[in-house]
Image (cartoon, grey):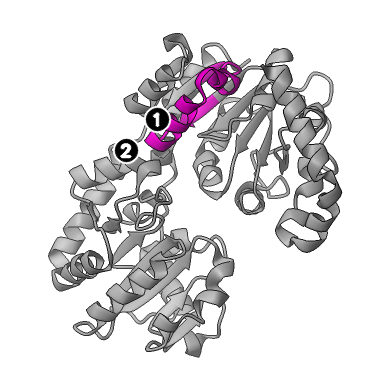
């Protein structure tokens, strides 16, 4: 079956090969990583004799952010190990470079690159540069060709912080016997929850190859901001001290219109309210500013000059890496990807600043956090712009309750740390040398 997979993947590549120069020329996004993902110009340093290497891979921005505390902890546990980090997407790679690029002083990384396309030659080329002793895949991004090659080289591959949504589980189950392509090459799976572990068992993974270690997103360092730093942040965003602020973070197409509709209703009773929107893809900002539903409001980008920002009703964050600290400014937050069927995004980012959280019904990628925050009283679920306006308006009208919800959200975060300790302990018992 694996031979057939490699043949099929190679045939597909040969079919698209004539079009690759056009893709390279036409798409700046693809141009940034096409050759690297084919195994050329990887930028990954060669391994010297006697070195011990750990290859950690994360798919995109969300997984890279999740992986950061894991990478740092691995370096603490194995200071002499060379950690090579890869991402699949351009935004994921740029996030990793910004947060922990090898050129940064004190970086835990020895090298940073792109994960190869699942083609026999590309995988061998990148793996030949890395030459790992251990591979850790963060959360998702399983590729049969890569896993089979690692297994053939007797290199252990561990899936850490593993999750499987009901939708993904159904998809894998539809593959029938072909699911063995995705999971037989994994040495061990460290699942976030018991439900995730049960899902992997349904897919044929033996009990001995599964551990429940928790979610390492709870182990990310809590950001701290001094009153002076907070004031500087307010100035940068054009916000006056005491002005009510609502942040809608990581929004997807279709959500901004619902958020703005809710904002327009609330603003009738709270004219001082400022809305900050951070699209998941900041490059969408230009198009969003042209949309008709924004016409009644003064708008600006974070990159605009000070006067433009201070006079704006709605401010768009138009660059990566700004949202996480921006949550310190808000009274409450809405976390996107949840009013549309995109699986949601990390609600812990506002929770760490003791901010109450609102999200929609589509939080399948963060179901455990959703449950904990709802049960703990730190979040509320809304199902559309009307409910969003109602719950956001209620928070603005009751400052005491708003603060209590924020404290409850922070308590949920603080009460669920410890996944990293369990992961490192499991790796020490059989995988780390």
Residue 312 in sight: yes
Establish if 14 lies above or below 162.
Answer: below
* Magenta region includes residue 214: no
- 162 is within the stretch colored magenta: yes
Q: Is residue 53 visible?
A: no
Using the image as rendered, state which of residue 356 and residue 102 is in the foreground. Answer: 356
Give the percent coordinates (x, y) of residue 140: 53, 34
Q: Percent x, y for residue 52?
A: 72, 22
Name the residue at 67% across, 39% down.
Answer: 86
Q: Nearer the viewer, residue 131 or 428?
A: 131
- The residue pinned by badge 1 equals 192
Which of the image's four quarters has the C terminus?
Answer: top right
Classify residue 68 as left or right of residue 333: right
Query: Which mark, by number, is residue 368?
Result: 2
Identify the residue at image location x=85%, y=41%: 40
Q: Residue at x 38, y 34 (%)?
A: 166
Residue bounds of the magenta highlight = 159-188
Looking at the picture, does residue 348 appear above or below residue 82?
below
Q: Say what secondary structure mark 2 lies in.
A: helix
Tell me where residue 396 sits by quadrant.
bottom left
């Amino acid at each position: 079956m694996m031979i057939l997979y490699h043949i099929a993947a190679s045939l597909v590549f040969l079919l698209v090969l004539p079009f690759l120069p056009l893709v390279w020329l036409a798409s700046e996004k693809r141009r940034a990583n096409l050759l690297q993902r084919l195994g050329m110009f990887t930028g990954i340093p060669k391994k010297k004799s006697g070195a011990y290497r750990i290859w950690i891979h994360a798919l995109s921005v969300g997984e890279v952010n999740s992986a950061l505390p894991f990478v740092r902890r691995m370096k603490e546990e194995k200071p002499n190990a060379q950690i090579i980090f890869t991402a699949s997407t351009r935004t994921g790679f740029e996030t990793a470079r910004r947060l922990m690029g090898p050129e940064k002083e004190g970086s835990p990384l020895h090298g940073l690159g792109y994960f190869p396309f699942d083609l026999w030659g590309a995988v061998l080329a990148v793996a030949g540069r890395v030459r790992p002793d251990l591979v850790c895949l963060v959360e998702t991004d399983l590729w049969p060709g890569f896993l089979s090659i690692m297994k053939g080289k007797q290199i252990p591959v561990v899936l850490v912080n593993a999750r499987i949504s009901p939708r993904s589980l159904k998809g894998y189950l539809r593959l029938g016997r072909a699911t063995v392509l995705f999971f037989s090459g994994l040495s061990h799976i460290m699942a976030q929850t018991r439900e995730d572990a049960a899902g992997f068992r349904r897919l044929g993974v033996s009990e001995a190859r599964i551990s429940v270690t928790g979610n390492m997103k709870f182990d990310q360092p809590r950001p701290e901001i001094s009153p002076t730093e907070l004031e500087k942040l307010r100035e940068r965003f054009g916000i006056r001290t005491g002005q009510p602020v609502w942040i809608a973070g990581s929004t997807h197409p279709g959500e901004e219109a619902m958020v703005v509709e809710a904002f327009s209703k609330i603003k009738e009773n709270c004219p001082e309210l400022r809305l900050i929107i951070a699209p998941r893809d900041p490059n969408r900002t230009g198009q969003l500013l042209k949309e008709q539903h924004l016409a009644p409001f003064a708008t600006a980008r974070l990159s605009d000059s000070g006067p433009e920002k201070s006079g704006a009703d709605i401010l768009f964050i138009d660059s990566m890496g700004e949202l996480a600290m921006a949550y310190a400014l808000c009274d409450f937050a809405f976390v996107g990807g949840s009013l549309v069927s995109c699986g949601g995004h990390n609600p812990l980012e506002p929770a760490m600043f003791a901010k109450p959280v609102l999200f929609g019904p589509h939080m399948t990628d963060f179901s455990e956090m959703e449950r904990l925050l709802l049960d703990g009283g730190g979040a509320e679920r809304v199902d559309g712009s009307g409910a969003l306006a109602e719950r956001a308006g209620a928070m603005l009208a009751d400052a005491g309750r708003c603060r209590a919800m924020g404290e409850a959200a922070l308590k949920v975060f603080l009460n669920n740390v410890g996944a990293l300790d369990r992961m490192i302990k499991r790796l020490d018992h059989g995988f780390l040398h």
